[in-house]
Image: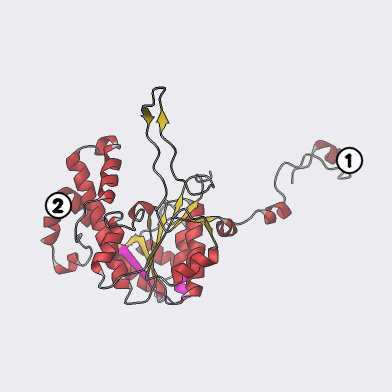
Amino acid sequence: MKIGIIGVVLSGMLMVGCTTTTRDDAMMIPSIESKARSMEILRGDGSGVVRWDDVVADMASADVVLFGEMHGHSLGLAIAQELWIDLLSANPDAVLSMEFYERDQQLAIEDYFHDVTDRAKFEKAAGKNTGNNPAGHVAMIDAAKDAGRPMIAANAPRRYVTMARKQGYGKLDELSGLQRGMFELPMGDQEGGYKDRFMGLMAGMGGHSGEEIAEGMFRSQSVWDATMGDSVVDGLEMGSPVALVVGYFHVQFGNEQGGSGLIDQIRVRSDRDLKIVTIIPLARDAQALFLGSDEVLGEDGEVIAESEDSDLGIADYVVYVGAEEE
């Protein structure tokens, strides 16, 4: 507490000028976990707000839960963290899977989960640090460990993804069986809205604008999707739902074939119809589900600006978390 000059002169009889947070004030500031639990969750079909407990119940009855995230957004990560903790309570058979751990790091995970190593040694073995290991991920991993539930390193090591981009799938097929176990190649038709969105994104990135370069980048994306999809389906042998934490681009618009490369790869690899529940945080301010703006018309009725894309159908559940706070 900062005390004004009058308070000093009067030896504490009169205090003015409090300009910093007191200990009592600090205790009144909600934690990021409580803020996460207070956020409004919307149904992705535009039908309105849904209760937190109903979202947890829906996830608990699913085969697969996909936590689409904005990498590094602390509030978005905290929402996934708190939902995962409640999901573990609602369904103790849940399994955690993470995009941000690669298959050749699975041994480091097993050593940590079976107390062969401590957290510091685990993070060193897995190449994690404060810059690439956000608090939300740490909390989800430790919640799984404390509950005695497994964690799957879902992704392909980057060196094989780079090979797909630069040399094509054929070179990956030439590798040994041990190497082939580190990644999967995509199955089925890859055409559709997912590829269109990806190629459109690459076209807007200057140096990645060439069609050949964009096709190579899409091969990388497809190896990620195929490997994570395979990891999720394999994880169903250990329990369900398998909850995958992954960048939201992989997840969005996944209700139809071609909407999400990841969801397509999950479905094509399973021998049964899976219930897949998706949730995505978006960096818009709190609002009703964003349904897109109207077209902007000129004086003669011509369209001078197209309507913005809608969030309708982007996921089963949407949370508008605003921009990341500084």
Name the residue nearer the viewer: 190 or 98.
190
Return the residue at label 2.
Answer: 168
Q: Residue furthest top?
A: 299
**Closer to us: mark 1 or mark 2?**
2
Describe residue 177's horizontal placement relative to residue 148 as left or right. Answer: left
Q: Give the range drawn in magenta.
A: 143-154
Q: Is residue 227 magenta?
A: no
The answer to whether 325 is drawn above or below residue 317 in the figure is above
Residue 324: x and y, percent? Answer: 50, 46
Can residue 156 be seen here? no
Report crowding for label 1: few under 14, some 14 to 19, many 20 or more residues within 10 A (C-alpha).
few
Return the residue at label 1.
Answer: 10
> Residue, x 44% and y 38% (percent of image)?
293
Tag 1: residue type? Leu
> Residue, x 52% and y 55% (percent of image)?
48
Tag 2: residue type? Gly
Tally of numbered discs: 2
Q: Distance between the residues labelled 1 and 2?
A: 78 Å
Mark 2 or mark 1, which is nearer the start of the sequence? 1
Label 2's element?
A: loop
> Residue, x 86% and y 38% (percent of image)?
9
Q: Contact (CB < 8 A) between labels 1 and 2?
A: no
